[in-house]
Image (tube, rainbow, N blue to C red):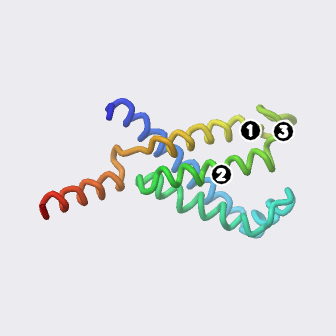
Amino acid sequence: MNKKYEVGALILRLITGLTFLLHGIHKLQGGFDNTVGFFNSFGIPGFLAYVVVFIELVGGVLMILGVGTRIIGFLFAVVVVGAIFTVKLSAGFIGTDGSMGYEFDLALLAIAIHLMLNGSQLLSLDSLFRQKRKAKTVSES
């Protein structure tokens, strides 16, 4: 694998993981009842707030560590698509009257799809586990 490509993927993985982790923390700091209420106000079942916060918190940590990057990338993409179509789309691409549009979410979606399709091996626990498994298989042969 091209070293420059892997460095780029590492940067995307770390920043995306940190972004989702901090968004999950922010939702908790605002009070979980408020987050559930926010979801309900847009016609989204309140229980999905728990799912989204779980994906953001746990997925953010796993993404930073490089565990299940492709799966977490898919989950992040689902969360972002949900946010765009239920909350952000009506504000437009850039937003109006101080409300944020969906431009940031679209960038996160593109990054999540990239990580889902390509993964990120540099400095990832998945890569470390794969190397250990490969070494064990070779030593058993």
Residue position marked by numbered label 1 in the rendering: 102
Q: Position of residue 123 (x, y in %)?
A: 33, 47
Name the amino acid, label 2.
Val
Residue at the outermost front position: 141
Name the amino acid, label 1.
Tyr
Q: Is residue 88 left or right of residue 103?
A: right
Q: Quadrant of the C terminus?
A: bottom left
Residue contact at pointers 3 and 1, CB within 8 angstroms: yes
Residue position marked by numbered label 3 in the rendering: 91
Q: Is residue 25 above or below residue 18?
A: below
**Label annotation for residue 115:** none
Q: Is residue 58 above or below residue 8?
A: below
Q: Residues within 10 Å of mark 2 (few under 14, many from 20)?
A: some
Q: Quadrant of the N terminus?
A: top left
CA–CA distance in space, label 1 to label 2: 14 Å
CA–CA distance in space, label 3 to label 1: 8 Å
Q: Secondary structure at mark 1?
A: loop
Q: Position of residue 21 (x, y in %)?
A: 56, 55
Q: Residues within 10 Å of mark 3 (few under 14, many from 20)?
A: some
Residue position marked by numbered label 2 in the rendering: 78
- Identity of the residue drawn at 67% across and 48% down: 80
Q: Work out whether residue 19 or residue 108 is closer to the camera in this orientation and state it.
A: 108
Q: Earlier in the sequence, mark 3 or mark 1?
A: 3
Answer with the quarter of the image where residue 42 lies.
Answer: bottom right
Q: How many marks?
A: 3
Q: Position of residue 15 (x, y in %)?
A: 51, 43
- Identity of the residue drawn at 61% across and 60% down: 25
Q: Earlier in the sequence, mark 2 or mark 3?
A: 2
